[in-house]
C-alpha cells in the first residue's frame, strides 16, 4: 500500500480540480513570454500531484494560475465543476477559503509587522468572523500546536523564528480554514535537508487528517517521490510527461524525464560512476523556443522530424501521458 493518502478513494471520486489547456503569458521588456503552454490534468480530493522541472519551466506560474493569482491566456481551471475565471464577488470569496498556497520563502511570505498568531488568525477573521475573538484564538492555538509550535510562541514575530519554524507557520496559515486544495510552491527548497523531512512529514500528516488535495511544486525529485502519487514533468511551459510516481521513477518514457532522474546522484559511488550519462546542454530561451519539440536541442534521441512536428500529449496507458515522437521506440532505455 502507498504511504501517501487517497489512492483508492481518489481513483473513484469525481475530480476536485480540472485543468484544461492552460496557457499563461507575461509581457516583458523583451516581448511576450508564454510561461505555460497547453497544460492540463485532473486532481481528486486527497490526492497529491507533483510538478517538476528545471528553474524557469513554468511550475510556479502554473501553480499561481490554478488559484487565479495570474490571468489565463487560454484554457480553464475548474473547481468542483465551476470555472474559476467566471466567479465574481461573494462566490469567488467563498471559494477562496478552499484554495490556499504555501510559498517558497517562509520568512518573506509572512508580514514582519504581524505576530505569528495574527498571521494564522487572519484567514479566520476574513472567512470565519462568526467564530468571534475567543473562538479564533482557540483555533489558532490548536493549529500552531498541531504544526509543532506551542501557544507561548503566539505573540512572537517572524524574525524570531528559524526558516523551518516560519514554514510551519505558513502551513498553519494555509491549513487553518481546512481548505480542499493547497498549492505548495517549492515549500522546502529554502530549508536545511533535516528540516525538509520534517516539513514533508507534517504535510503528509495534515493531508491524511483532512483529505486535502495537494499540488506540490519542486525541483527535489526525492521529496516528490516521497510525497506525491502522480508527477507532471514540465519543460519550457509544456507538459513532457504525466505519470504515476512509481512508473515515472522506474521507467520514464520522455527523454527529459530521464535527464531529470539521471541528475539525481546515486547513494552508491560505484553505481554512480558506472551509470551512463549524456551532456544535458543549456535550456533554450523561452522567448524563442525551438521549433517542433521544445526539448529537441538537448535530446540525445532527437531526429529531423522532431524539429518539424510538435509532439502531441498522448496516452501511453490508462494512467500515463507523454509528449514525444519516439517514446514507442523505448528511446529512454537505450542510453
Image (spheres, rainbow, N blue to C red):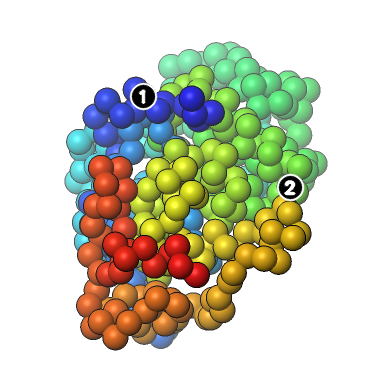
Quick check: 292 left or right of 119?
left
Dot 1 or dot 2: first in sequence order is 1
Tell me whether circle 1 and circle 2 mark residues in contact (CB < 8 Å). no
For residue 128, above or below residue 126 = above
Give the total number of marks visible in the rendering: 2
**Dot label at residue 193:** 2
Residue underneath mark 1:
8
Q: Is residue 104 visible?
A: no
Gap between marks 1 and 2, in whole Å? 31 Å
For residue 297, above or below residue 143 = below
**What residue lies at 37% left-to-right and 48% top-to-bottom?**
243
Which quadrant holds residue 142?
top right
> Mark 2 falls on what kind of element?
helix
Which quadrant holds residue 141?
top right
Q: How many residues crowd mark 1 within 10 Å: few (<14), some (14–19), many (20+)? A: few
> Mark 1 falls on what kind of element?
helix
State the residue in front, 140 or 293.
293
Q: Is residue 116 visible?
A: yes
State the residue in front, 283 or 209.
283
Q: Position of residue 313 (x, y in %)?
A: 25, 60
**What residue lies at 59% left-to-right and 53% top-to-bottom?**
220
**What residue lies at 48% left-to-right and 40% top-to-bottom?**
228
Quick check: 219 left or right of 332?
right
**What residue lies at 57% left-to-right and 33% top-to-bottom?**
203
User: Closer to the observer: label 1 or label 2?
Assistant: 1
State the residue in front, 106 or 208.
208
Quick check: 144 left or right of 36?
right
Q: Position of residue 236 (x, y in %)?
A: 40, 70
State the residue in front, 163 or 55.
55
Q: Position of residue 10 (x, y in %)?
A: 34, 28
For residue 285, above or below residue 171 = below
Amino acid at each position: 500500500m502507498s504511504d501517501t493518502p487517497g489512492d483508492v478513494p481518489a481513483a473513484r471520486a469525481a475530480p476536485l480540480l480540472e485543468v484544461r489547456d492552460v496557457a499563461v503569458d507575461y509581457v516583458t521588456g523583451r516581448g511576450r513570454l508564454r510561461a505555460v503552454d497547453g497544460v492540463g490534468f485532473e486532481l481528486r480530493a486527497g490526492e497529491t500531484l507533483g510538478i517538476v522541472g528545471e528553474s524557469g519551466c513554468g511550475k510556479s506560474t502554473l501553480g499561481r494560475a490554478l488559484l487565479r493569482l495570474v490571468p489565463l491566456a487560454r484554457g480553464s481551471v475548474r473547481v468542483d465543476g465551476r470555472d474559476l475565471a467566471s466567479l465574481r464577488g461573494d462566490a469567488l470569496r467563498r471559494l477562496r477559503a478552499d484554495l490556499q498556497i504555501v510559498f517558497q520563502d517562509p520568512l518573506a511570505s509572512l508580514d514582519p509587522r504581524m505576530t505569528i498568531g495574527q498571521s494564522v488568525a487572519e484567514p479566520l477573521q476574513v472567512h470565519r468572523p462568526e467564530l468571534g475573538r475567543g473562538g479564533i484564538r482557540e483555533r489558532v492555538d490548536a493549529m500552531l500546536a498541531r504544526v509543532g509550535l506551542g501557544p507561548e510562541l503566539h505573540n512572537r514575530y517572524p524574525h524570531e523564528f528559524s526558516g523551518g519554524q516560519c514554514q510551519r507557520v505558513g502551513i498553519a496559515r494555509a491549513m487553518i480554514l481546512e481548505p480542499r486544495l493547497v498549492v505548495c510552491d517549492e515549500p522546502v527548497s529554502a530549508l536545511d535537508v533535516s528540516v525538509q523531512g520534517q516539513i514533508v512529514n507534517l504535510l503528509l500528516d495534515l493531508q491524511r487528517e483532512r483529505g486535502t488535495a495537494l499540488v506540490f511544486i519542486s525541483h527535489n525529485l526525492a521529496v516528490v517521490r516521497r510525497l506525491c502519487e502522480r508527477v507532471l514533468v514540465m519543460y519550457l511551459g509544456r507538459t513532457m510527461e504525466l505519470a504515476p510516481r512509481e512508473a515515472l521513477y522506474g521507467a520514464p518514457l520522455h527523454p527529459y524525464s530521464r535527464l531529470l532522474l539521471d541528475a539525481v546522484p546515486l547513494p552508491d559511488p560505484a553505481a554512480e560512476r558506472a551509470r551512463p550519462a549524456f551532456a544535458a546542454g543549456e535550456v533554450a530561451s523561452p522567448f524563442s523556443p525551438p521549433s517542433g519539440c521544445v526539448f529537441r536541442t538537448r535530446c540525445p534521441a532527437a531526429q529531423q522530424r522532431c524539429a518539424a512536428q510538435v509532439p502531441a500529449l498522448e496516452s501511453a496507458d490508462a494512467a500515463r501521458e507523454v509528449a514525444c515522437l519516439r517514446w514507442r521506440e523505448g528511446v529512454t532505455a537505450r542510453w
